[in-house]
Amino acid sequence: MTQAPSAGNELSNPPSDGISNLRFSNNSDHLLVSSWDKRVRLYDVSTNSLRGEFLHGGAVLDCCFHDDFSGFSVGADNKVRRIVFNVGKEDILGTHDKPVRCVEYSYAAGQVITGSWDKTVKCWDPRGASGPERTQVGSYLQPERVYSMSLVGNRLVVATAGRHVNIYDLRNMSQPEQRRESSLKYQTRCVRCYPNGTGYALSSVEGRVAMEFFDLSEAAQAKKYAFKCHRKSEAGRDIVYPVNSIAFHPIYGTFATGGCDGFVNIWDGNNKKRLYQYSKYPTSISALSFSRDGQLLAVASSYTFEEGEKSNEPEAIFVRSVNEIEVKPKPKVYPNPAA
Amino acid sequence: MASIQKDPILQVETTCGSLLYELQIIWDEVGETETDRDKMLLELERECLEVYRRKVDQANRSRAQLRQAIADAEAELAAICSAMGERPVHIRQSDQSVGSLKQELATILPELEEMQKRKIERRNQFVVVLEEIDSITNDIKGQGEYVTSRLLIDETDLSMRKLEELHGQLQALQKEKSERVETIRKHLCALYSHCSVLGMDFNEVVGQVNPTLSDPEGPRSLNDQTIGKLGDAVQKLREVKIQRMQRLQDLATTMLELWNLMDTPLEEQQEYQHITCNIAASEHEITEANSLSEDFIKYVEAEVVRLDEVKASKMKELVLKKRSELEDICRKTHMLPVSDSAIDQTIAAIESGIVDATMVLEHLEQHISKIKEEALSRKEILERVEKWLSACDEESWLEEYNRDDNRYNAGRGAHLTLKRAEKARNLVNKLPGMVEALASKTIVWEQEKGIEFLYDGIRLLSMLEEYNLLRQEREEEHRRQRDQKKLQGQLIAEQEALYGSKPSPSKTIGKKAPRMSTGGAAANRRLSLGAAMHQTPKPNKKADHRHIEGALSTGRRGLDIAGLPSRKQSMNPCEVLQSPLVRKPFSPISVASKANIATATTTQQVAKEISSFATPVKNNNNSMKNLEEEKMMTMMMMQTPKNVAAMIPIPSTPATVSVPMQTAPTPFTNNARLMTEKPEEVVEYSFEERRLAFMLQSGLV
């Protein structure tokens, strides 16, 4: 196995409790981090500085950028918030009945989409005045608690407990475009859409990632497959780790996975190859994010509670610059190349 | 003399003097005494005085009369003036005290006459007004017949004010009367429209209220009672109208529902469009004549009843249609349809009206959706069953083919047959695995659902078991045939030795052994049900008969086969099922052996540990699942044929070695439900949910 020379730069002032998610801005090298210490933090990665810290009423389970001046966060206090960074102001867009697990902002629809353990996905219009009646655009019942969501273009993929996967078209949310069952046999951990919009990758707690396609034609469905990862063979025993996070490279379409084994792997989905494995991080990888140009990869090393309460390594955020060779797809090599 | 005649007083004085002279002459002649003469003269003077006095008295009396007359006239004048409320003219004049009494009287009399004339005129005015008032009052208060009342005029008050007062009163009365007339007119109008809408005789209704109203020419009763009664009648009719309207609207609603239910054509609906268009109309909007008459409602009612009847029959049709749909689905998915008698009963119930057909329909629809759902879950297995059955068919064909001694004769299409045989052999080789996989799938399915998987009412597992039994019997049969053949060969050899000729092998009773064994070991040879079924053309062997019967009686009809001894079971799902341990998700699986799974009856144990659930639980799984796990495990660096291209390793660069993924085609399984539906599995929780629960529990939040 290839080991990376270093884990990358560690950010100062990391969160003090589990990092639930981190995301790079689409416009700058700002990094938004949500964590279980009830805070959302905004870092400027280029200067390794903490630009803002916002305290919420409960553990923050997810966050995302709106633009460079504001973002959204959701958490265990059931609330959906909009944070304005430079003034430190926060609006409450609305609430769910149970903790809110994930949040996405759709530039296509201009809406905030949240998924919650109350088995609903709700859409919000952040321009509306504060209050649920004004901002809520719709609420859509899910078969189970929402565990992960991902957006690409007008498509929204919602993965829930019970291994359900619902695929929506944001322009018609009344009904899922497709209802699927996860191809993997175990609980869904993370779902992320391909940047080219043709499908999604879905990871489970049992060291496996499924590559799926939206197109229901037989030709497209024949391409789907699943592969094993984040496993360790030790004395004839196979140790399998949950795959917590998937992040697609914005340019090459290759992707990184992070597991509870503390490894980050880079994969080439088209050629079914592992491109790279970075050196082991102190503890589980809870979240991953590529910067807008794919030059940087933020890695959250933070215990994800997979073994319950126990003493664990301190939370850390590493930002490593990505070499092209680590993420560029390698074409298939045939044994007898055409002359 | 002329002068005497000119002045009578002078004449009288002359006459008196001459008379006195004459008297003196007489007296002188007579010689009357002085005393007599004085006496006579005194008497004369007394008599003269008397005459004077009388005249004066007379004059006095006449003056008094005159004064009286004046006073009377004045008094009357004053009375009239006061009655008429005018200032007496005379009083002004008396102040001036003009002339003699007669003059005065002469001036006052014409005035009086004038006043009296005016008074009469005024009085007449009063009379007219009062008469009018009286008549109107009569109209308003009376009972319709004219009651003349005495005109009581207060003579003392005939003033203009009073007259105006009366005029005012009259006008008020006139206004009231016109108002009443208007009210009655309105009531009558309303009554008329109601009557026309309700299809009632207007004159009759009005006549009941008050006979005078029905006469368009004659005077109408205007009194309160009439108006009240009229109002009551209008109200009553309005209530009737509303009541009927609601009734009609109810009917129209029913009608619309029925139309909807039965998809009644528009032309048929058109006829009743004018009814249904009023379905939401309010009371005042319905003005069409006869649109609420009893006949009309009866007519609509009749239509609704007709539609209801049609509906009942349609319902039956619908129910029957749904039922055939249900049966169709059942047939397609080889499930047992709902028993006919149950449906016949429901239909009978519909006809007898015990059960609402719509309820039955709903019930049927629910049933259909349930069946459809079940059919969906059965689909995968059914596909395999179809494959298996077709493979069985192919097997039987192959067997038949193998018996054909002329099979290698080159004829038309022989190459096709050869190809088919080749394919069939391949298929037959796969049959055992197919059966085994099918059985394990079925077991999984049955475990999941908790019911038996029935194929046309027969438990699929028993079919498979039966198939295996038959296969073994066939094997034995073959063995026996071989033995017999061997024996025959010996016999022939003996005969040959005796008679020197060899009978043609084709004429031997025992045919050539079917080439079933080409597939592999004897243990893998299986006969199919289909083979037994189709093996009939030359029923010259008892064994064959037995097979046919067996197949027909037990295989297809699903008779109990438990009594048959199971001689050998290469696949015994029961053993797996009976195992007390059930694999939990996340539980590690330890590898005990890597035995050949295709033939394995031993439980595969795969060492496996998911870090989140460290407690090792011994795994026991059905063979199918094991198979998959094993595949996944052993496919490190290996790939299914589809992914062959991807597995070719590329020369590694020193910096980054790209490693092929350990991929496997994603199974299109439904058996993932296994996980969630296992009884032990309560609810799955993500790490985050556990974490939050822990935080809440330990009071960290």
Image (cartoon, helix red, strand yellow):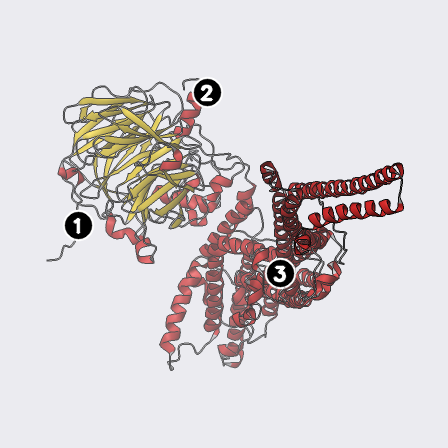
Q: Amino acid at mark 3?
A: Cys
Looking at the rendered structure, the secondary structure element under dot 3 is helix
Question: What residue is rendered at 18% in x and 37% in y?
Answer: A292
Question: Percent from the top left, x then y, of residue B630?
Answer: 39, 43
Confirm whether circles 3 and 1 share one chain. Answer: no
Compared across the picture, whether A66 is left or right of B596 comes to: left
Tell me the residue that label 2 is attached to: B697
Q: Which quadrant holds residue A296?
A: top left
The mark nearer the N terminus, 2 or 3, is: 3
Q: Which mark is residue A333?
A: 1
Compared across the picture, whether A194 is left or right of B358 comes to: left
Confirm whether circles 2 and 1 share one chain. Answer: no
Q: CA distance from mark 2 to mark 1?
A: 55 Å
Question: Percent from the top left, x then y, of residue B631?
Answer: 37, 45
Question: Percent from the top left, x then y, of residue A125?
Answer: 32, 38
Image quadrant where one finds the C terminus of chain B = top left
* Subunit ID for the residue under disc 2: B
